[in-house]
């Protein structure tokens, strides 16, 4: 069995003296393939329990992660009477964070719900209403939540912490704070995860402030800037859905390499100025696949980010099933 491990080399980030977070990519794309939609698992080292960051694809991503050796602590003997895939899904995913309720971020949660166990879902109040009214409503799907229409099966307790409020993520050692994002009229969000004095930022879908006519990203950069100055931010996951050829009026609340680099330039200003983002690990997520023959969206986005990366950040492109240590 081939084991894939993306090791984060933090040569310029000398304050990172030990790894704080394990991340497994269950899904990395932003559409077309139902088996590879946005979802990541995160946990602190030494703890077996994960928080799922979105849930576009869960079980297919877990299967790919097992194939790649990204869950070395789960053996058939340990998982019994479940399969290793079932054990990770039911027992090791302790809670969910849903950044927003678009289908490519919740499909795995919905489809897996009949075989899941009682867990908490953390999400914005607007997203909670969508889950109750449009998914768990006995029309789209049985109501596996704790509120809403018809019989409430109660598998999921949907919790909507106030924006900016610190809360415990399930029964893990991690704590979270939710911040709003602008996504073409949809309420999306970022989760800032913290444990043992270290932090990690997970962004749901977002457009650039200039395109969205918003200040949400600017507000987040002001929060992350001091963490970078303190060498406390271990990394982030943020989307770049399209290459730079995508016109603004067809972005639908997403980023391109040019727009992301412009936003990161703003972050640099709040992080201590020139050079302050050097070697900061940034995982690029939610790349949109294409049906155009001969076009490789990831290769193109990777090239455009590299060409414009005067900030010196460490862009990472995790594939489904990959594990990274931050």
Image (spheres, grey):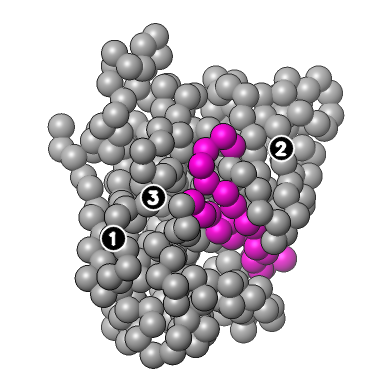
Q: Which residue lies furthest to the left in this view?
A: 1
Nearer-the-camera pick, 35 or 167: 167
Quadrant (top left, top right, bottom left, bottom right) of the N terminus: top left
Closer to us: 92 or 194? 194
Alpha carbon distance from label 2 to label 3: 25 Å
Image vertical order of residue 285 relative to residue 35, above or below: below
Res. 17 mark? 1
Magenta segment's dominant SS is strand
Q: Residue at x 80, y 31 (%)?
A: 147
Q: Residue at x 49, y 87 (%)?
A: 269
Check disc 2 and report its element: helix, strand or loop.
strand
Where is mark 2, residue-wise? 158
SS label for mark 1: loop
Front disc: 2 or 3: 3
Q: Is residue 151 visible?
A: yes
Q: Which of 168 and 39 is in front in this view?
A: 168
Could you tell me if the residues under marks 3 and 1 are in contact, i.e. CB atoms within 8 Å? no
Q: How crowded is mark 1: few (under 14 residues within 10 Å), some or many (20 or more)?
A: few
> From what the image shows, is residue 191 above or below residue 130?
below
Residue 324 location in percent, x, y? 30, 51
Task: Judge the density around disc 2: few (<14), some (14-19), many (≥20) Cα neighbours within 10 Å.
Answer: many
Cβ–Cβ below 8 Å for labels 2 and 3?
Answer: no
First in residue order: circle 2 vs circle 3: 3
Region in magenta: 170-195
| Lower position in the chain sequence, tag 2 or tag 1 | 1
Q: Where is residue 67 in the image (x, y as percent from the top left)?
A: 25, 33
SS at mark 3? strand
Identify the residue position indicated by label 3 in the image.
21
């Amino acid at each position: 069995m081939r084991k894939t491990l993306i090791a984060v080399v933090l040569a310029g980030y000398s304050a990172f003296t030990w790894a704080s977070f394990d991340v497994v990519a269950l899904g990395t794309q932003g559409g077309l393939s139902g088996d590879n939609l946005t979802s990541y698992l995160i946990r602190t080292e030494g703890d077996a329990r994960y928080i799922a960051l979105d849930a576009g694809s869960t079980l297919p991503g877990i299967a790919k992660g097992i194939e790649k050796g990204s869950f070395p602590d789960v053996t058939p003997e340990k998982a019994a009477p479940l399969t290793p895939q079932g054990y990770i899904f039911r027992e090791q995913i302790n809670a969910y964070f849903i950044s927003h309720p678009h289908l490519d971020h919740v499909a795995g949660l919905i489809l897996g719900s009949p075989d899941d166990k009682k867990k908490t879902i953390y999400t914005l109040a607007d997203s909670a209403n969508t889950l109750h009214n449009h998914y768990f409503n006995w029309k789209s799907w049985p109501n596996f939540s704790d509120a809403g229409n018809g019989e409430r099966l109660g598998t999921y307790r949907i919790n909507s912490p106030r924006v900016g409020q610190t809360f415990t993520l399930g029964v893990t050692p991690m704590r979270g704070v939710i911040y709003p994002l602008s996504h073409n009229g949809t309420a999306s969000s970022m989760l800032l995860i913290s444990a043992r004095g270290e932090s990690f930022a997970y962004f749901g879908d977002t457009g650039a402030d200039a395109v969205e006519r918003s200040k949400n990203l600017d507000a987040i950069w002001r929060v992350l800037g001091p963490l970078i100055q303190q060498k406390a931010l271990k990394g982030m996951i943020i989307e770049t859905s399209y290459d730079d050829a995508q016109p603004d009026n067809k972005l639908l609340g997403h980023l391109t390499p040019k727009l992301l680099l412009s936003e990161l330039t703003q972050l640099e200003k709040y992080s201590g100025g020139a050079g302050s983002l050097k070697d900061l690990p940034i995982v690029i997520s939610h790349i949109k696949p294409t049906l155009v023959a001969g076009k490789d969206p990831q290769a193109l986005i990777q090239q455009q980010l590299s060409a414009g990366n005067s900030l010196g950040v460490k862009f990472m492109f995790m594939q489904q099933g990959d594990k990274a240590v931050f």
